[in-house]
Amino acid sequence: MDVEPQHEDKTVLTLMCASIIVALSVAFFFVFGLKDMTGDSARSYQTSSLPLVLIAVFRYACAYLAFHTIVFWMIRSPVPGRMFVVLHETSEEAMIPTMGFERIGTFSSWTLMAFGLAFFIAGTATWMTVFNLNVPPLMNTLTVVLMPIAYGAAFITSTVVRYVIIPEEISMERPFGTYFKNYELVMHNYAAIFLALDLFLVQAELQWQFGIFPVFFGIVYVLFSYVYARRPQGYYIYSFLDPRINMAPVYLLGLLFACSLFYFGLWGMSLLITWNALLGGLALAFWVSRIVLFRRQVKDNPYAFQTSS
């Protein structure tokens, strides 16, 4: 009986690529003087044509939604989640029930945490501005760093879930109703919607150079996934993040590029909104409408949906 040849383990090459990306990203940060740029941009996050108190309330509400979702609808939920993973030891696919903190290992969950933390920090800075208090420089810097991370992560998450993950679940005839549960809707839909709304209402000054921040976020998540899989009975939440496979370095570069690319899309939208608020707002609303999804499939139309229960 013929034995299928084993592919060469690409872990070392993948980690070398990750290390090079980290070094280049750090160099980019200093070469372009991003520390000074974040300080200059920070003030624009605390301006709006609406009363700032409304912006502060909105941001805190978004932060609370994220934290409530993580704590009560995910970690403390008695109903187990469902996840198809690749086991590290055997490289076989398996379906596992997830409970507790295990449920926040996905990229979507990290996106939700970035979304909540960004709005909490930005909201706190807004409240301090409302009460004429000096906003600490660290808080300003975190706002400028975290919001681009949230932009890139939320928009890539919504896009991939709608156009890749759900269609794949349908093609494999798997039950996909879980993607319409409350916590999934917050991660995959509301995060992108509320970030877009904040971008339109506040019209913060974004810079293309800030696209490096989603890259930092992506590389941290990728390295986390490598370590997470090495624990006892560990697994890769996403098969393409297995550093041993032939295309692992390519997938790594693709993920990081995509995180940055989606931020560039939001940066472009911010320029359009600055030039013409109505046109920019309509374009942003159209983009969001094409990546969010609140219903499930019926009949033979892959994008004809009925309300999920």
Image (cartoon, rainbow, N blue to C red):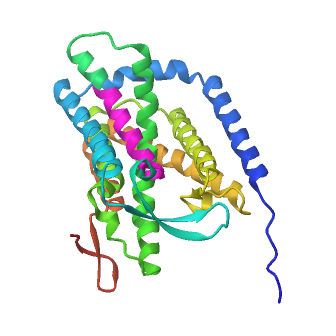
Q: Quick check: 60 left or right of 21?
A: left
Quadrant (top left/top right/bottom left/bottom right) for the C terminus: bottom left
x 65%, y 29%: residue: 26
- Report if residue 126 is visible in the image: yes
Q: Quadrant of residue 52?
A: top left
In the image, residue 134 lies at what x, y percent? 32, 9
Q: Is residue 100 above or below residue 7?
A: above
- Report if residue 286 is visible in the image: no
x 48%, y 44%: residue: 264
Q: Quadrant of residue 202?
A: top left
Q: Is residue 215 above or below residue 77?
A: above
Question: Would you say the magenta stretch is mainly helix, strand or loop?
Answer: helix
x 44%, y 37%: residue: 148
Q: Nearer the viewer, residue 242 or 201?
A: 242
Please state the extent of the stretch shown in magenta in the rendering.
104-123
* Most distant residue in the bottom direction: 1
Q: Quick check: 256 left or right of 104?
A: right
In the image, residue 54 lies at what x, y percent? 17, 30
Q: Nearer the viewer, residue 198 or 187?
A: 187
Q: Quick check: 224 left or right of 129?
A: right
Q: Is residue 289 magenta?
A: no
Q: Is residue 113 magenta?
A: yes
In the image, residue 31 lies at what x, y percent? 65, 24
